[in-house]
Amino acid sequence: SDSYAVSGGLHGVGISVVNALSKTVELEINHAGFSWEQTYTNAVPGPLKKGAPTKKTGTTVRYWADEKIFETTTYDFDTIARRLQEMAFLNKGLTITLTDERPATIEVGDADDVDVAEAPKSEDELAEEAANTELADEAVVDAEGKPENSKKKSRTRIYHYPGGLEDFVRHLNNRKTAIHNSVLSFTAKGTGHELEVAMQWNSGYAESVHTFANTINTHEGGTHEEGFRSALTATVNKYATEKKLVKDKGDKLTGEDIREGLAAVISVKVADPQFEGQTKTKLGITEVKSFVQKVSNENLAHWFESNPAEAKIIIRKAVESANARLAARKARELVRRKSANDIGGLPGKLADCRSKDPSKCEVYIVEGDSAGGSAKSGRDSMYQAILPIRGKIINVEKARIDRVLKNTEVQSIITAFGTGIHDEFDISKLRYHKIVL
């Protein structure tokens, strides 16, 4: 019964469904000192065959999906690889081997292009990659230059993470710069609940929080994420106030401020999972929220008290995020005041067109006043508008939103388009249906 104390399924019919949707299912079972085999054809069971004595344990399941039911039975290597990698991260010490043995004539993609290539790789993985690359380079072709069907291009991924969720977080921050060295992690067990959390802040601006329930990726979050977020916001604010790391006791850091640059994984295991909807992407157990919140409060408070230097770095980043948020609000208000809906609100350098029909209008964004002058002289002023801007403007992908909105060129573009930004964005107010760079 311990083996099934936690399961990603809800009704225990997974293998039955696989059998119903497959042409053939083959089972090889090592149990009670013997090997056993059974084959199901079109969901009808064949005889159970007793094999030779064995000391092995475990079950092998092979199935062939029914083409009459599924539109395609070609499986995507990348999708399977990502899911199995998640399973290896979530089950510390587990080793999962994924091998693609399809013929070279089947389009399976390039092993070097899959998303999981960013993950920490063992020596075995690297050796397998090298071997697979050599095999691909030596592919045999027939007289017409096509690969021989008998030649297979096998590729293998081996996932094994002794650090579990800590390795998961390092993987998430693999291409980012962590602002503190250690990965904050903790585990706890309650009545019918288990929790494991790992987290680390990086110098970026986006949060990357991943939640799981019984190893199922809950993309929409749920009660476990709500409990964690609530605890994190309360703990950081309390610590920052007590240590006088914020200027005013009344200045509260928002959850968004605190989670800026946060990479975190929250994994819960529950005996009786309840999900909202049919897709299992949002956990809906109320008791889990209070459990996660209590455990996270205790462990986060202890970590911050025990690591004052790293805690100060984290809070400093949150304070900077709060300052940027307030500055961005002011900048948005400024942009809003300069809206194209206001009288005389259009940018001074914009040579607007005369037509008021957006579907017929187009705006050319050109580099510099000289290019703008040439474009103005050759345009059709009825339908073509010209907006000259400085040659090199701010990198909006890397800069904070407050700096972006203070930029003169960005303000001109926003005002000229007329759609507004952020919560006030309205595509129906776009003044030009063609934007030419």
Image (cartoon, rainbow, N blue to C red):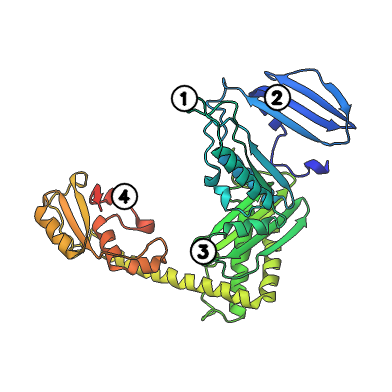
Contact between marks 3 and 1 (CB within 8 A): the answer is: no
Compute the Cα span from label 2 to label 4: 52 Å
Q: Residue tagged by mark 1?
A: 144
Between circles 1 and 4, the one closer to the viewer is: 1
Mark before the other along the chain sequence, 1 or 4: 1
Compute the Cα span from label 1 to label 2: 37 Å
Element class at badge 4: helix
Find residue 190 and report its horizontal and vertical position in percent: 77, 56
Find residue 214 and report its horizontal and vertical position in percent: 69, 46
Type of residue at label 4? Ile
Q: Quadrant of the N terminus?
A: top right
Of residues 208 and 79, which is closer to you in this image? 79
Of residues 158 and 389, which is closer to you in this image? 158
Find residue 242 and report its horizontal and vertical position in percent: 62, 79
Instruction: Answer with left or right where residue 27 lies relative to residue 376.
Output: right
Residue 364 visible in image: yes
Element class at badge 3: helix
Type of residue at label 1? Glu
Instruction: Answer with left or right where residue 163 lies relative to residue 58.
Output: left
Q: Residues within 10 Å of mark 2 (few under 14, many from 20)?
A: many
Above/below status of 416 relative to 284: below
Contact between marks 2 and 4 (CB within 8 A): the answer is: no
Type of residue at label 3? Glu
Between circles 1 and 2, the one closer to the viewer is: 1
Element class at badge 1: loop
Q: Residue furthest left?
A: 377
Q: Residue tagged by mark 4?
A: 427
Compute the Cα span from label 2 to label 3: 49 Å
Q: Which mark is residue 256?
A: 3
Q: Which mark is residue 224?
A: none
Q: Residues within 10 Å of mark 4 (few under 14, many from 20)?
A: few
Residue found at x 31% / y 65% = 393
